[in-house]
Amino acid sequence: MRFWLKDFLKDLRYYPSALLGGIVIGIMLMISLVVPLWIPYSEAVRLWRGGEEVWYRSPRQVPPAWVNWFRRDKLADTLIFSTRDQPSWKHSQPAGEGRRIEVDFVFNYPYDTFPQELALYIWSRFREKAPFLVATWKTPDGRSIRVAELRVEGIKQGFRFSQDRRLLQRLEGVPPEEALFSTPGESQPRVLKGTYRLHIEAITFEPDADVDVEFIAYGQVYGWAGTDRYRRDLGVALLWGFPVAMAFGVLGSVGTTLIAMGLAAVGVWFRGWVDELIQRLVEIFSIIPFLPVLILVGTFYSRSLIVILGVAIVLSVFSITIKNYRAIFLQIRELPYIEAAQAYGAGSGRIILRYLLPRILPLMIPNLVIGVPSFVFLEASLAVLGLGDPVLPTWGKVLDEAIFSGSLLQGSYYWVLEPALLLMVAGLSFSTVGFALDRVFNPRLREI
């Protein structure tokens, strides 16, 4: 076994593309094992199906942060400041029956573009008398602008700068994300870089009342994968796409190959009505349209990946591949060592498992590897058609929502290119390894 493996690796080194593909496959399999531990299934579903309450800190439909590496004008990143994360930013002192709470968010703004949006979130705790809050914006050139005056009426309250009419009147109709980060009076607004300060003063009217605030300047880029129109981090779906694609592809290819090979061996060995039944089933299934049947199953029965995978394996098993395996097994069945095995009393099961199937392994392994991309693309295709798993984030689901939302027309190319690139890399890696294995195991296919 050791010498066989040594010779195999020696032959494989003549195919550098296969070695590169093997490394990529190894990385994808490693990611597939780590992701479910890092982001459990329940958490992935919660994040992907979550709305504004889960992703309120993320900007809406922006590209990944690494696009700034290729830009001269740096897009703004998202800035988050919260007294819930940093209680030391909040200072309070007694004031009448309640308290005066002061918060200062001081930050540097070095970007070349304006934020996408500005928002303030307030968490309050009181019994009857609601706190009152005033927010003042201070620019690097010394200007001071009152941006918010509001009564805190709920446990959690959101304040969008661009939706406040009084603030828009103070800024003479200029959007707050531009007016607060630029010098007034210029014909073409430009970002005023420097240190900004948001001073917040809250007055409570009860001794045990309290207020926490969070300020978010939503940027034009986010994370390593960007976000979609629901503010969701696409990195969650892209990462969980690895285990889904690998599991669907490997299980589909292994199941189809092993079952088809086993049925062909059983038919050749027992012959008679067994072989005839298998061949007739192959002929029947060969005229059944593959994709329309899966569409019908997903539409009228279930869109579960397990159900879709099971139907796909059944439809793929009884394909023309069985006839190819049968032709090979017919030759193996007449070899002398099969007659010798029958002579010393070996049973049918032993002959099939120990003498017929092992002889075809060199042909099976390349076909098994080459068959993985077809199942990976099948899952993505069904998802693009809207028949993917309704709760699980996958590469196909990302493509489906990108196409449905018209992301290409809006210039969000990253939304389509990222999952498409991962699908192409997965397919190319398995294909190059499979073709190289075919040449290694079948010397007649090697180049002279």
Image (cartoon, rainbow, N blue to C red):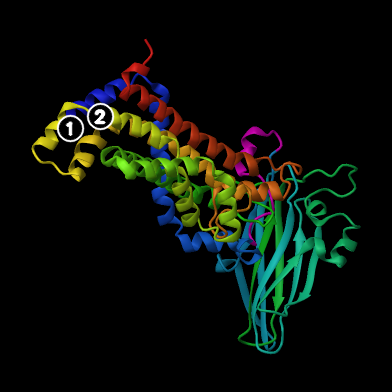
Tag count in the figure? 2
Residue sticking out furthest to the top: 448
Q: Nearer the viewer, residue 170 or 123?
A: 123
Q: Residue 318 or 45: which is nearer the viewer?
A: 318
Please say whether residue 375 is visible from this viewpoint: no
Circle 2: element type: helix
**Do the numbered discs 1 and 2 sit on residues whose CB atoms are within 8 Å?**
yes
**SS label for mark 1:** helix
Which badge, 1 or 2, is on the more N-terminal residue?
Answer: 2
Q: For this view, does 232 lie left or right of residue 42? A: right
Which quadrant of the figure has residue 1? top left
Amino acid on which disc 1 is placed: Ile
Marks 1 and 2, how far apart at CA: 8 Å
Describe residue 238's horizontal placement relative to residue 230 as left or right: left
Q: Is 381 inside the magenta-drawn segment?
A: no
Location of mark 1 (residue) = 338
- Assess whether residue 71 is covered by the magenta stretch: yes
Q: Measured along the vertical axis of the image, is residue 446 above or below residue 374?
A: above
Instruction: Please determine whether, in this image, residue 398 is positioned above or below residue 46.
Output: above
Image quarter (top left, top right, bottom left or bottom right) of the C terminus: top left
Q: Residue at x 61, y 43 (%)?
A: 65
Residue 48: numbered disc: none
Instruction: Identify the residue position indicated by label 2 in the image.
Output: 332
Which residue occupies 89% across, 44% down?
186
- Res 408 quadrant in image: top right
Main SS category, magenta section: loop
Q: Residue at x 62, y 39 (%)?
A: 417
Q: Position of residue 33 (x, y in %)?
A: 39, 49
